[in-house]
Amino acid sequence: MAVVFADICDSTGLYNKLGDAAGRNVVNACLSAIAGVLPRYDGRVVKTIGDEVMCVFPSTDLAVLASSEMQSLIASSRPGSYPVMLHIGLHYGPVLVEDGDVFGDAVNVAAYLTAVATPEQILTSETTEKCLSSALKSCVRPVFRAMLKGSAQESTVYQVLWRTDNLHITDVNLHSKRLIPSDTGSLLVSFNDKRVRIDQWRSSVTIGRSPDCDLVVTDKFASRKHLTIKLMRTNFYLIDHSINGTFVSLESGDEVHVLRSELLLETAGRISLGRSRQEHSKEIIQFTRDRRSMYRV
C-alpha cells in the first residue's frame, strides 16, 4: 500500500491564537476537507491522530495525486475561514493490516517523511518514485539523501511538485551533500522508578522542583522549572532554564555544563541538576535511545 500522512502545520500556535474551541473548528474543517479528497483516488482514512490524518491508497500514482489535491485544496479554500498549511509524507511498501489499522516500516517511513517535510511540502521515497507512472515521474524531483527505517543504505528522498507554477520552488544545488537526519529512535528519560518516552506523540518533558513538572526532583540546587528536553524534527535537545545550570555526562566521559542554552542529546548519558558529578549529586537523571522508530503508529 501507499501510506500517506497529512499533518496540519503548527496547530499549537493555531490554538494559542484562536482559542481551543475556534482552533478545533478550524482543525476539524481541515481534516474533513482532506478526507473528502480520498474517495476520488480509492483512498481510505485509517485514523485521525490529533491534527493529522493517516490514509492508504492501492497505488503510488493515486497517493501522489491525492496528496497534491490535498495541498491545493487547503491552500486555496481556507477551511474554517482561517489559513492553514499541510506537510505531507508518503511511502509505498508492504504493510500489516489488522482490524482496519495498518502497521510496519512503511508506516514509520511515511511518518518520518512527514516530520521532515516543511509547510506545503510533500516528500516521498525512492521506492515510491520507482513505482510511479512515466507521467507522474516528471512531477517529482530528488532533494535529499536519507537512511530510512528498514534499509541498510542511503536512499533518495523526492519532493512532489504539486503547484502549477515554479515561482515558489527553490533550486537544488546538485554539488552539495544533502543527507538529512535519520530516525534514530525515541529518547527514554529515567529518574528513580519513573520513565518517560519522548517521541512523535510526546514531544517534550519538563524537569524541576515544581510539582507540575513531568519529572519532579527535590535538590535545592535545582530550579522549579529547571530544564526541558524537546524533540525538534528528528533530534532531541536539552534546554536549560535554571540558575545553576545543568551538568550532562556523556558516554565519552566528558561533562558539559549547560546554562541558559541548549545541548543536543545523542546516544546515552546522565543529567545532574545544579551541581556537577564531582559534587556527588544524589538525584541523577538518565537518558538513552530506544532504537525502535520514534514514529511507531
Image: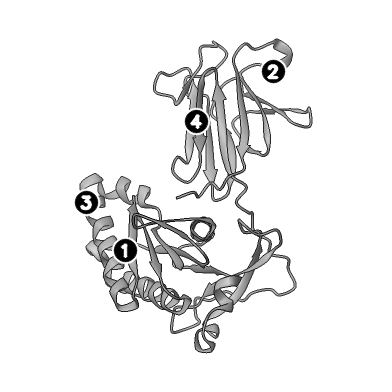
Marks 4 and 1, the one that precedes in the sequence: 1
Secondary element type, mark 3: helix
The residue indicated by pointer 1 is 83
Marks 1 and 2, the one that precedes in the sequence: 1
Label 3 and label 4: CA atoms lie apart by 32 Å
Could you tell me the amino acid type at mark 4? Answer: Val
Label 1 and label 2: CA atoms lie apart by 48 Å
The residue indicated by pointer 2 is 276
**Is any atom of residue 262 visible in this view?**
no
Label 3 and label 2: CA atoms lie apart by 47 Å
Secondary element type, mark 2: loop
Q: Residues within 10 Å of mark 2 (few under 14, many from 20)?
A: some
Could you tell me the amino acid type at mark 2? Answer: Ser
The residue indicated by pointer 4 is 196
Q: Residues within 10 Å of mark 4 (few under 14, many from 20)?
A: some
The residue at the point 54 percent across, 51 percent down is 233
The residue at the point 75 percent across, 73 percent down is 175
Q: Residue 124: x and y, percent?
A: 53, 69
Marks 4 and 2, the one that precedes in the sequence: 4
Circle 3 or circle 4, nearest the eye: 4
Marks 3 and 4, the one that precedes in the sequence: 3
Label 4 and label 2: CA atoms lie apart by 23 Å
User: Are the residues at dot 4 and dot 2 in contact (C-beta closer than 8 Å)?
Assistant: no
User: Are the residues at dot 3 and dot 4 in contact (C-beta closer than 8 Å)?
Assistant: no
**Is any atom of residue 111 visible in this view?**
yes
Could you tell me the amino acid type at mark 3? Answer: Ala
Could you tell me the amino acid type at mark 1? Answer: Pro
